[in-house]
């Protein structure tokens, strides 16, 4: 597939964007970095530390992002905790999250085919009453799965392992947006909301951008956020990964 020199804006965090940009460039696109969010540690580590020091009290450890894994292990190391309890079962959303754990020698028991937190629920078994779950997650994490588990009688501890905050694109990156782009990519609701705010702060109308770009979203949750924000007719990947996003963009360009 060839993306025909399309100018594609990447709004995900800079560290993640570089790999995505290389994939797009290899297919003939002009990737343009425009990071609108970044991940930072919690302002208060009390609740996270309390949970990490009591890991042997939990039945399931649930990760919904690679960031959650990285910040979890950074804090484990800071506390001098060298390994997980052998009775602790681990579940993840998405193959990249599972890979981040396997690279640390952790066996992931459950990763659903659909890359949404709610898809994890059937894999936890039928009798959830009294089971204890730990979710190390973002301050902006969705709560649907935790609510479903509580409704089934489980005890769920959602702790902030990292915060998602607004980033500041470089002046050159803002100018690249002003010059016009063909496609704007979003990988989470927070990228949608922060992009709109940053565009406005820089005197741009996020709903009438130079080049009249197509909006491309990594999955249905992000697509819904884009639509609710007022972005028109976003396309969405069928596989909720960066590779799926490249595929849906490529198919659009080819057609």
Image (cartoon, rainbow, N blue to C red):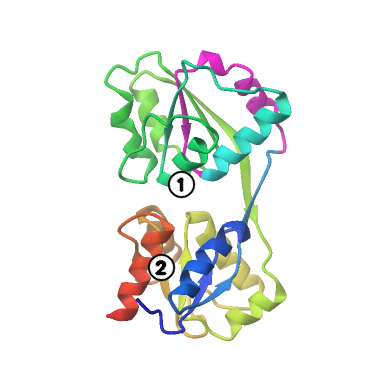
Q: Quadrant of the C terminus?
A: bottom left
Q: Quadrant of the N terminus?
A: bottom left
Query: What residue did someone put label 1 on?
Result: 96
C-alpha separation, residue under disc 1 versus residue under disc 2: 20 Å
Nearer mark to the viewer, of 1 and 2? 1
Q: Residues within 10 Å of mark 2 (few under 14, many from 20)?
A: many
SS at badge 2: strand
Q: Residue at image x 49%, y 30%?
A: 106
Q: Residue at image x 36%, y 18%?
A: 153
Above-or-below relation of 218 to 78: below
For the residues labelled 1 and 2, say whether their Cβ atoms are less than 8 Å apart: no
User: Can residue 30 be seen in this snapshot?
Assistant: yes
Q: Is residue 64 magenta?
A: yes
Above-or-below relation of 27 to 186: below
Q: Residues within 10 Å of mark 1 (few under 14, many from 20)?
A: some
Q: Residue at image x 45%, y 37%?
A: 143
Which region shows up in magenta?
Answer: 43-65
Query: What residue did someone put label 2 on?
Result: 216
Q: Residue at image x 65%, y 81%?
A: 175
Residue 230 falls in image quadrant: bottom left
SS at badge 1: helix
Above-or-below relation of 16 to 207: above
Image location (x, y in percent) of residue 184: 48, 72
Image location (x, y in percent) of residue 242: 43, 59
Depth check, front residue: 63 or 45: 63
């Amino acid at each position: 597939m060839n993306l025909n020199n399309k100018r594609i804006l990447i709004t995900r965090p800079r560290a993640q964007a570089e790999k995505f940009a290389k994939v797009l460039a290899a297919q003939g696109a002009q990737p343009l970095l425009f990071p609108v969010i970044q991940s930072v540690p919690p302002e208060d580590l009390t609740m996270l530390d309390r949970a990490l020091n009591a890991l042997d009290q939990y039945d399931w450890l649930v990760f919904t992002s690679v960031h959650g894994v990285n910040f979890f292990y950074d804090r484990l190391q800071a506390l001098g905790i060298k390994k997980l309890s052998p009775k602790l079962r681990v579940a993840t959303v998405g193959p990249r999250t599972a890979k981040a754990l396997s690279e640390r020698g952790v066996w992931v028991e459950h990763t659903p085919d659909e890359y949404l937190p709610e898809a994890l629920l059937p894999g936890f078994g039928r009798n959830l009453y009294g089971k204890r779950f730990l979710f190390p997650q973002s301050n902006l994490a969705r709560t649907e799965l935790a609510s479903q588990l509580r409704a089934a009688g489980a005890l769920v501890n959602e702790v902030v392992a990292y915060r998602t905050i607004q980033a500041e694109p470089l002046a050159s990156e803002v100018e690249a947006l002003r010059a016009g782009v063909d496609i704007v990519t979003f990988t989470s609701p927070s990228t949608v909301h922060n992009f709109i705010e940053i565009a406005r702060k820089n005197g741009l109308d996020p709903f009438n951008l130079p080049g009249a770009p197509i909006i491309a979203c990594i999955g249905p949750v992000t697509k819904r956020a884009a639509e609710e924000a007022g972005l028109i007719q976003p396309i969405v990947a069928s596989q909720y990964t960066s590779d799926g996003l490249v595929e849906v963009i490529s198919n659009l360009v080819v057609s």
